Image (cartoon, helix red, strand yellow):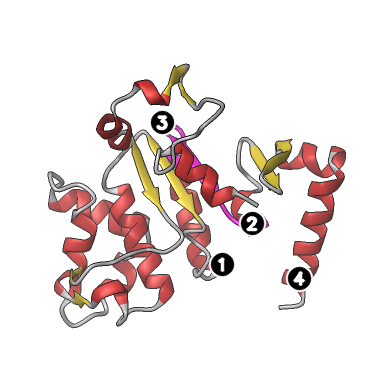
Amino acid sequence: CGKSTLLKILIRAYEVKSGMVYLQGIPSKEIALNKLRDLIAFVPQNNYLFHGTIMENIMCGNTKAHNNDLLWAAKAANVHEFVERLPNGYDTVVEASGNNLSNGQCQRIALARALIKRAPILILDESTAYLDPSCESKILKVLKDIAQNSIVIIVSHRITTIKNGDSIYMMGSGNIIAHGAHADLILKNDNYKEYFENLVNHENHI
């Protein structure tokens, strides 16, 4: 329905032919692309990891970061928990595309790479889809803290992931068909209410 496309427009991976994207009142086209990208940390649906150590995969998000920054980002993304159990820890070599890791581990490393950048805008595209509810809950608490001083945009099909957001935008056929807080949308928007009820029924049968 266009969620990932919209995110790519925000980071100017795609340039729009009509309409305008504003960043704090400034048209994004007027911001130099490298400066715009400096303001944003983006975790796409397909989390690409390169052949190198776990440490290198995280630190490439901010080459000027220190070890304490690495540890903070790794703990925030729930990476530290499984890395501690690996024989070589952060020096464990990741195969290209993370073939020797689970999808959930790859997602957590990609998230840590974004967090270590400490950008004022954090954009996550289905970046917790492979995480179990307990792991996702821990990460969402961290993201809530980060959102006190940053803009956090999360795309997800999971209602538990987005229902506590300040603003929820529901898309359909390339358009925004609902906008508001979860409690208001449940009461006032039939599209959102139906989607929510279907998700709850689905999750209850898993």
Residue type at mark 3 is: Asn
Q: Mark 4 or mark 2: name the one nearer the start of the chain.
A: 2
Nearest-to-viewer mark from 4 and 3: 4
Residue type at mark 2 is: Thr
Disc 2 to disc 1, C-alpha distance: 9 Å
Residue displayed at 84% across by 41% down: 189
Q: Mark 2 or mark 1: name the one nearer the start of the chain.
A: 1
The answer to whether the residues at label 3 and label 1 have Cβ atoms under 8 Å apart is no
Name the residue that disc number 3 marks.
149
The answer to whether the residues at label 2 and label 1 have Cβ atoms under 8 Å apart is yes
Crowding at label 2, few (<14), some or many (≥20) Cα neighbours within 10 Å? Answer: some
Please check the rendered image and state whether residue 157 is part of the magenta-colored stretch, yes or no: yes
Q: Is residue 97 visible?
A: yes
Nearest-to-viewer mark from 4 and 1: 4
In the picture, residue 88 is in which quadrant?
bottom left
Crowding at label 3, few (<14), some or many (≥20) Cα neighbours within 10 Å? Answer: few
Residue nearest the observer in this picture, 67 or 162: 162
Residue type at mark 1 is: Pro
Q: Which residues are magenta?
A: 144-160
Disc 4 to disc 1, C-alpha distance: 15 Å
The label number, if any, that marks residue 133 in the structure image: 1
Name the residue that disc number 2 marks.
160
Crowding at label 4, few (<14), some or many (≥20) Cα neighbours within 10 Å? Answer: few
Disc 3 to disc 1, C-alpha distance: 25 Å
Name the residue that disc number 4 marks.
202
Q: Mark 2 or mark 3: name the one nearer the start of the chain.
A: 3
Image spot of residue 85 (x, y percent): 27, 79
